[in-house]
Image: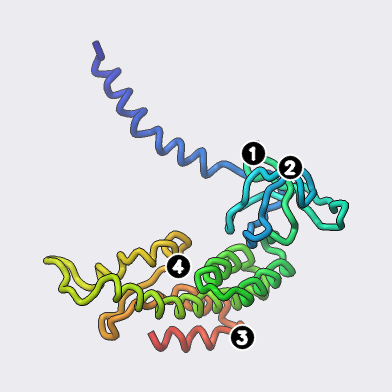
Amino acid sequence: MFTRAAFWGIVFLFVLSPFAEAQTRRKTVTPGQRAIVVDERLSVLRTQPDIKAPLEQRLRRGRVIGILGARKSKDGQQFLRVSVTRNTRGWVLAEAVAKSGNAIDAERLLKLIEDSDDDFIKARLAKLCAEEFRSTPSAPRCLLKLGEAADRAADRLTRDAKRRVGNEEPSAGLSKRDYFLNFVGLDRYNRVGVIFDYDEKTDRIVYDGEAYRELAKRYPKSAEVEIAKNKLGKQ
């Protein structure tokens, strides 16, 4: 039979456990020099520095890893030895990752952004660039490209949402804005921190402009700041 003290002890542990688990996750540090996976086409983690070595896993874009060393393969390809977790190690092609804060890697990431035809990929990579390379000259350009990609995406998202929502009147207590901002097409943008809003006057989804505001606040002397201010002025 439980005593009152035992009962409250169980309740305390039940409430505390998720908090303790979250704290543990936050304290987890990946060994090595911080780097970010930026090119999923090349991001295969292998057992050896060889393009034909067995695959362990494919690393997703945006994954934080730690660089432990480097080696060239017999074919002359540059591989990095990386840590994915405290206990997971492997080799990945150097072109698949960018070292956080490295100006040269920031420029390489910008080229990936420019070469992509997919606005979601552009926005995702540009957000990674802005977050991981804040002290480099590329950062304001990344923020501008993030905003521009999100603006273009808003047009397509509006068309798709209108086809999905249709012309039906909203249910009682809801507005058209509620339906548009719950449109499934927004989900993947929301997961990477690119947020949209609904403009009732124009009846369309619009980018909320956060990248432009951050550019204007953080890089007021950059060449891109006037473009950002003009974008904000049109919202």
> Which disc number belongs to residue 194?
4
Q: Earlier in the sequence, mark 3 or mark 2?
A: 2
State the scheme by which the image is colored: rainbow
Element at label 3:
loop
**How far apart, in angstroms, are the residues tagged by discs 1 and 2?**
16 Å
Q: Nearer the viewer, mark 3 or mark 2?
A: 2
Residue 162 at x, y percent in the picture: 29, 76
Name the residue located 30 percent from the left edge and 74 percent from the top edge: 163
Element at label 2:
loop
Residue 73 at x, y percent in the picture: 84, 52
Residue 182 at x, y percent in the picture: 30, 64
Asked if the residue under mark 2 is in contact with the one under mark 1, i.e. CB atoms within 8 Å, the reply is no
**How far apart, in angstroms, are the residues tagged by discs 2 and 4?**
35 Å
Q: Which residue is mark 3?
A: 223
Quadrant occupied by the N terminus: top left
Q: Name which residue type carries label 2.
A: Thr
**How far apart, in angstroms, are the residues tagged by discs 3 and 2?**
45 Å
Element at label 1:
loop
Q: Which residue is mark 1?
A: 86
Q: Which residue is mark 2?
A: 47
Q: Name which residue type carries label 1.
A: Arg
**How far apart, in angstroms, are the residues tagged by discs 4 and 1?**
30 Å
